[in-house]
Image (cartoon, rainbow, N blue to C red):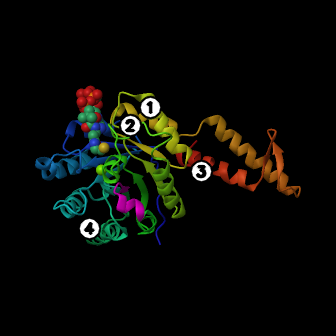
Amino acid sequence: MQERPRRLRRCQLSVPGSSEKMMQKAAGMGVDFVFLDLEDAVAPSEKRPARAKIVQALNTLDWGRTTRCVRINDLSTEYAYEDIIEVVEGARENLDMVMLPKAMSASDVQFVDKLLAMMEKKLGLKKRIGIDVLIEEVEAMMRVEEIAASTPRLECLIFGMGDYSASQGVSIRDIGGPSGYPGDIWSYQRHKLTIAARAHRIDAVDGPFADFREPEAFREECRRAMTLGMVGKWAIHPSQVEIAQATFSPAEADVARAREMIRAYDAALAQGLGAVQYDGKMIDIASVRIVKNLVDRADRIGM
Ligand code: COA
Ligand code: MG
């Protein structure tokens, strides 16, 4: 079986596929991951012409190290299959990923998986196109474990709190924004999705925050998602990119401390000790497992 690529997703920038100007801007931003949108950021009248614009942007712009993804329309629409066919045939190896919104079940993801497999064979593509899935309907949240297990092509689950709010009937004014609910209204959903993703060795990412003029509130949402195990957050505006990429990057000092702690633990083990004092606190193999996640993030970034 092919290994899943280890991609960076500290920030996934959403860019309307109908806007050549925004796609051009996005290509030069140095963001980890961009998805060119055919779904909600594109009006129905623009959905078909946007496919060709996306192909053009993928084939002609210099995207550097940015992972390039297209978000298709959901599988209940008349657009989804042609979104995949036109963009994959047009962009071929200039496309890395397909994002599936409003997945309802594992079989939705398997449909996209099979279609991509057929196209890869027909076109003779050397690399496998990955799938990221948006969990944004209550049905999907209920079945998140089976969706996480759906196919080895799946690389990431994203919590889409905009549509999810509508689906659950959450009263909220701005997507991803404050709700007045005591505590963190998304604690349960973020944990549930992240547990399913981690159990299947895939990434968990947090969705959009619409109020792009509130950078500190956005940073706090990034921090919460990061603390409970998510690897990144969406940006809907260029001003959110740097905040997300910085918040989901471990601090140099923390990485150095983590590596030192692992060395201290290994030294203790060599002396036959399972638990020792480090920095005035107890550390054991569980402490090492926790900081190894941090080191893993640092390795992915190349720190
Ligand atoms: N990607 C790339 N460039 C973007 C961008 C994005 N998501 N959002 C804004 N920009 C560009 C603008 O074109 C503008 O460029 P300019 O300075 O060369 O004119 C610059 O960044 C500043 O934008 P600003 O004037 O502050 O906002 P705007 O009114 O042009 O756009 C939105 C605001 C919300 C309409 C826009 O950010 C947007 O469309 N975001 C994505 C929406 C989306 O994808 N939704 C679906 C997922 S939830
Ligand atoms: Mg949505």
Q: Is residue 70 left or right of residue 287?
A: left
Q: Pointers 2 and 1 in contact (CB under 8 A)?
A: yes
| Disc 2 from disc 3: Cα separation | 30 Å
Amino acid type of disc 1?
A: Ala
Report the residue that reaches farthest toward the right.
Answer: 271
Q: Is residue 303 left or right of residue 151?
A: right
Q: Which residues are magenta?
A: 134-143
Pointer 1 residue: 217
Does 173 sit above or below residue 110? above
Pointer 4 residue: 123
Query: Can the viewer see residue 62 in this picture?
Result: no
Amino acid type of disc 2?
A: Gly
The spot of residue 151 in percent (x, y) is 41, 69
Sooner in the amino-acid sequence: mark 3 or mark 4: 4
Q: Pointers 3 and 1 in contact (CB under 8 A)?
A: no
The spot of residue 123 in percent (x, y) is 26, 67
Q: Secondary structure at mark 3?
A: helix
Residues packed near mark 1 inside 10 Å, few (<14), some (14 to 19) or many (20 plus): some
Sooner in the amino-acid sequence: mark 3 or mark 1: 1
Q: Is residue 141 magenta?
A: yes
Residues packed near mark 3 inside 10 Å, few (<14), some (14 to 19) or many (20 plus): few
The spot of residue 299 in percent (x, y) is 58, 48
Badge 2 residue CB within 8 Å of ligand 1: no
| Disc 3 from disc 4: Cα separation | 35 Å
Q: Quadrant of the C terminus?
A: top right
Pointer 3 residue: 296
Pointer 2 residue: 177
| Disc 4 from disc 1: Cα separation | 45 Å
The spot of residue 183 in percent (x, y) is 51, 40
| Disc 2 from disc 4: Cα separation | 43 Å
Residue visible at 60% across and 36% down?
Answer: 251
